[in-house]
Image (cartoon, grey):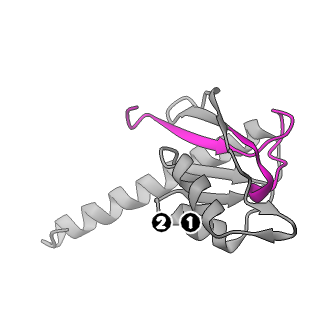
Amino acid sequence: MDDQTFKVAVATSDGINVDSHFGHVNEFTVYEVDSITGDSEPVEFRKIEQNACKNATCGGEAFEHIAERLSDVEYVLAAKIGPHAVQSLSRRNIVALDVCVPIEEALHKVRDFRDRKKKIQERAKSILLQNGIEE
């Protein structure tokens, strides 16, 4: 995958909305998003063998397992995602977003966020170089 496209894992029960809790998901829908056009399409259904929340407890090894299964995505979207899950994902440089909107809307917002972040990073690098500061 080139820099023009990126992957987003979505917790959805209906394929239309981001509507599932991270710890209850048995399967994530992985979308590939074109950062130029904003086009997106589901490219994979990623099974989660054991969801992280059962018997009113969440976390631990299960979050780490899920995060490892999603290690090739840049973003995870879920209707609810707690701090321990966010930490597990963050350790793998995955941005976790807690949203409850239609998938198409969420993916466009993620693309816009990613684009703004990239522009800020490029501007910061330019300022450092202009001032003779190496990274």
Q: Give the amino acid type for the residue marked by disc 1 in the picture.
A: Ser
Q: Residue 56 at x, y = what percent?
A: 87, 70
Using residue 101 as the reference point, say whether residue 43 is left or right of it: left
Q: Give the residue displayed 83% in from the left and 52% down from the top.
A: 100
Using residue 132 as the reference point, say whether residue 69 is left or right of it: right
- Local SS, label 1: helix
- Residue pointed to by mark 2: 91
Residue farthest toward the left in the current orientation of the protein: 132
Is 64 or 30 nearer to us in this picture?
64
Q: Is residue 10 above or below residue 87?
A: above
**Crowding at label 1, few (<14), some or many (≥20) Cα neighbours within 10 Å?**
many
- Residue pointed to by mark 1: 88
- Local SS, label 2: loop
Please state, as top left, top right, bottom left or bottom right, where the C terminus lies in the image.
bottom left
Q: Give the amino acid type for the residue marked by disc 2 in the picture.
A: Arg
Is 60 or 95 nearer to us in this picture?
60
Please identify the quarter of the rendering in which residue 122 is found: bottom left
Marks 2/1: CA–CA distance: 5 Å
Report the span colored magenta.
1-28
Q: Residue 9 carries which label?
A: none
Q: Is residue 47 above or below residue 56?
A: above
Asked whether 14 falls inside the magenta stretch, the response is yes
Q: Can residue 70 be seen in this view?
A: no
> Disc 2 vs disc 1: Cβ atoms closer than 8 Å?
yes
Using residue 31 as the reference point, say whether residue 126 is left or right of it: left
Asked whether 92 falls inside the magenta stretch, the response is no
Q: Residue 133 at x, y = what percent?
A: 16, 73
**Crowding at label 2, few (<14), some or many (≥20) Cα neighbours within 10 Å?**
few
